Image: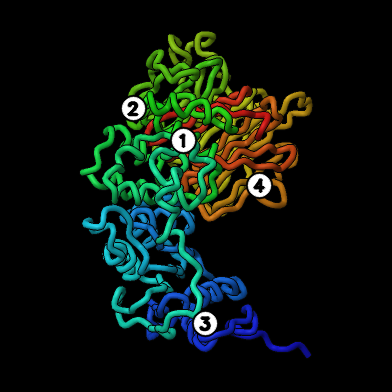
Amino acid sequence: MTAPQALGPVIGDWPVLDGAAAGLAPALLDWASRDDPACPRLCLVTGGRGTGKSRLLAWLLAGSDSHPATTVHATVPARGQIALTLAWEIGRQLGYGPTGPGELLERVEADPRPLRVIIPDLHLAGRGPADLPAADPRTVVAELLAPLLSLPGVRAAVEVERAELFPGPGRPLVLALPQGAPAFTRPDPWETGPDRTDPRATAGVRDWEQAPAAVRETALDRAVRQGTGSVLLTDPGYLAHGSAAAITAALADSRIAVPRSLRTVWASAGPVLSSAELSYSERAAVLHAAAVAVDPPLAEYLRPRAEQHSWTARWTRAELRTAGLTLDQGSLLVVDLIGRLHEHDPADGRPVARRPVGPGFRPVHIAAVGARRLLAVDAMGRLQLVPAPGAAPGTGAADPFPDHLRDLVLRHNAAVLAGGTAPVTAVAADRGNVAVADAGGGFQLWSAEQGTAGARSHRAHRVPVTAISCLVPPGSQDGLCLVVTGAGDGTVRLWDSRTGRSMPEPVERRNALPTALALADTGAGLVLAVAWSDRRLHLWRLSEGRVTFVPLVRDVDALALTGDGLLVCGGTDGAFALALDLDTL
């Protein structure tokens, strides 16, 4: 006879905990596993320095994955953070990307998950000049944590020295550890820092990459106290390697004189640079990408270091706010946010010409179907064929759309209007194949040669498809076309047109939304680019199953990839291009 399964978490599944904290562990676990209305949504772990507060929260985190009821969705130390930088990291860990406090609250309110968050060291929060509210941990409570905990389904375990710092909402559960000082306390580099006589502790550091971590973390705090913050903030080396939280807090003080463009650059780069997972060369590449169109001298200074990384920003055009884009015979075709079609030079983003799309039709997605012709989708999910410049629709050789392709488009639109087919959400095309994705979770693959006889329908996902790309592999002789789909369930799947089946497991599954896809045959083989809603770009070398992560400084809703590694990205914040080092992917 099998033993019955435990209904709740078992404390024996957690690591052994000793000292005073061990006595509070059962109460903390009981709080973490309850979801009834009578259970406080806030648990405060209080006590003096060295009494075991952090160890108790670390104990809860260490075993939290052993039972669904205790899953922790975000753990963000508040030490040295202001409300903005703390929100960036909470949003990143929840799968939203680095979001400001307002957007974070909106995303959490719409999130169906019951969210559990751990915030160590709240009493050490705050950054920047001491006379400003951002330096006070109570500002983090008022601007971020209290509003967050007022939302249904959010619960937090927070470390503070005294419960008075965070009084609610409601009546929190307080787990108090002894207040006495420990017998031994290791020196804290945050408070003591390097000796003031150490030249690396001043703004005169020349090689910030080689400077000790404590120096990079505390240098700007010291400079602000000494009134030399503006000197350090105009040091490009420090901007690429210094503390993102300290820089963000200092730039929020309008009394610190810096070039106006720097605050604009940091507004884009700061959320990305606040992530601890970036290498130093990648930090330089991110800062360079944010500066290309805003601060040319800073971008030029950073360019040699940025080019040592596997990707580098080639150009940025913030004015080119983009709904959809595609590459066609050496030209970049872009649909703007009001449905106008532009032709640009992909090498630098320079505008070349305007393209007519027909009266009364405002496309949001486009795909090149050969000979400078396009298949477009509007916001209602209807399709339209856009002829080459100078060609009139329906004029035979001047408008060489195959009759069966026109027939497929007409049939599809009629089915959408009649409610028999879900509206189109994305399109892609390659070498005579057209892939049309829809809001019902499926896609159709059309063959330009075979017409309706070659049309196939596939149920890709159970939720709307958000992005699609297709490619005929080089040397394919049997009609093979690879199709990649991304959907609102956070999965990206690879399909084989011969079998109509996807790979058994998704290429990726994440707690984010795939917003754009691009599949290309490159010098490194087949490469798949996936843009995600949390401002991450993943580059897959499909033959090896290897992936490279690229942080994005802007939202991306459209992608196009060339064989030599130029990746063009578009979104509501503009368009930009990255040069990829394919050999290091």
Identify whether 395 is placed above or below 467. Answer: above
Identity, as a three-letter code, of the amino acid under mark 2: Glu
Q: In this rendering, which labeled residue sits more in front, label 4 or label 1? A: 1
Q: Secondary structure at mark 2?
A: loop
* 257 left or right of 194 in image: left
Where does the image place residue 119, in percent across and percent down from the top left?
43, 68
Q: Nearer the viewer, residue 501 or 90?
A: 90
Give the farthest residue toward the bottom: 1
- Residue of label 4: 507
Q: Is residue 283 left or right of residue 8?
A: left
Three-letter code for the amino acid on which mark 4 is drawn: Val
Quadrant of the image occupied by residue 266: top left
Q: Amino acid at mark 1?
A: Arg
Choose mark 2 or mark 1, whichever is in front.
1
Q: Is residue 102 left or right of residue 417?
A: left
Which residue was labeled with disc 1? Answer: 206
Q: Earlier in the sequence, mark 4 or mark 2?
A: 2
The residue sitting at 38% across, 68% down in the picture is 122
| First in residue order: circle 4 vs circle 1 | 1
* Spatial separation of the CA atoms under disc 2 and disc 1: 36 Å
Q: CA distance from mark 3 to mark 2?
A: 52 Å
Q: Quadrant of the C terminus?
A: top right
Residue 319's disc is 2
Which of the 4 quarters of the picture holds residue 521?
top right
**Relative depth, front residue between 584 and 492:** 584
- Front: mark 3 or 4: 3
Nearer to me, 408 or 25: 25
Q: Which residue is mark 3?
A: 29
